[in-house]
Amino acid sequence: MKTDVTSLSTLMGNYVLPFIGICAWLILGFWVSSFGARLLHARLSRRIGPDTSRAVSNAVKVALVALFVFTLIFWIGVDVKAVLGTAGIAGVAIGFASQTSLSNLISGLFLVLEHPFRSGDWIEVEGTSGYVHSVGLLSTYIRTFDNRLVRIPNEVLAKSKLVNYTQYPIRRLDLDISVSCKEDAGRVMQIFREVVASNPSCFNEPMPVIALKGFGETSLDFLVAVWADRTELQATRSSLLRDIKERFDREGIELPYQRLASVTEREPVKNHG
């Protein structure tokens, strides 16, 4: 019986208690790292922006976790040289296996430093358009206009053509409008000027651009370009088109008609041979 008690005591002292201590230390490390990262993100978010602060806090979290792990290694008396050698070999193998992730990570750091967009911006990349939901170290999430969440790897964002529609407070709205070729071009341009001047969403500075672009087969083609607040762009487009249509109706301005190609039906040729 004494032998069993001694064996149990030895087992507890040599294995169970150290295992519990290791688990407790790791749990404490993950908790401290997460808490410190959240606290750092809250402090830096107002100064450098939520995206940059999130990247910095994540890097600090990884560094703290690594610190706790290396402290644990020293505590349990593992040969550090052997661990570093094994880690080096494993790092090479993992590096070959995760080249894409590494590329996304590096691209994410460049995006954070370059700062071409931030959370809430309306961007377009490779045909996908929407608002930036969040920016991570490996990928960026975009919320589309029909409320879908799209994940785009940071490497794609770094290499592709990216359009930021909300970088500046005002945007130019271009409308291509055609009227019948029989209409007087000067009269039509004057109508455009009056409609733009009466629309409260259109800015006087920078000045609107109203120009005759060219001639179609049955039309005169005009450009009506106005500046408006970026948040009112779609509303400005809708109100301008409505006002122009109502003014055309009052002034008797005709829109161009579509010329239909005549098609001659032929009777199939019969083989009399």
Image (cartoon, rainbow, N blue to C red):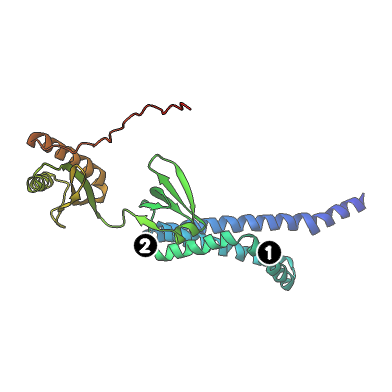
Please give left or right for residue 188 compared with residue 104 in the image.
left
Mark pair 2, 1: CA separation: 39 Å
Q: How many C-alpha atoms fall within 10 Å of the one at disc 1: few (<14), some, or many (≥20)?
A: few
Q: Residue furthest front?
A: 273
**Figure quadrant of residue 67:** bottom right
Q: Could you say which disc has been placed on residue 210 in the image?
A: none
Q: Position of residue 117 (x, y in %)?
A: 38, 58
Q: Position of residue 226 (x, y in %)?
A: 18, 51
Pick the residue in front: 267 or 169: 267
Please give left or right for residue 238 compared with residue 27 in the image.
left
Please give left or right for residue 138 compared with residue 268 in the image.
right
Q: How many C-alpha atoms fall within 10 Å of the one at disc 2: few (<14), some, or many (≥20)?
A: few
The residue that disc 1 covers is 93
The residue that disc 2 covers is 47
Q: Position of residue 10 (x, y in %)?
A: 84, 57
Q: Residue furthest bottom?
A: 81
Depicted 131 relative to depicted 239: above or below: below
Residue type, mark 2 in image: Arg
Question: Which residue sits at x=11%, y=34%?
Answer: 249
Residue type, mark 1 in image: Ala
Question: Which residue sits at x=51%, y=59%?
Answer: 58
* Secondary structure at numbered mark 2: helix
**Figure quadrant of residue 184:** top left
Depicted 77 relative to depicted 12: above or below: below
Please give left or right for residue 89 compared with residue 100 in the image.
right
* Secondary structure at numbered mark 1: helix
Chain-order first, disc 2 or disc 1: 2
**Residue 55 visible at all:** yes
Pick the residue in front: 198 or 246: 246
Depicted 39 relative to depicted 78: above or below: above
Q: Nearer the viewer, mark 2 or mark 1?
A: 1
**Residue 224 visible at all:** no
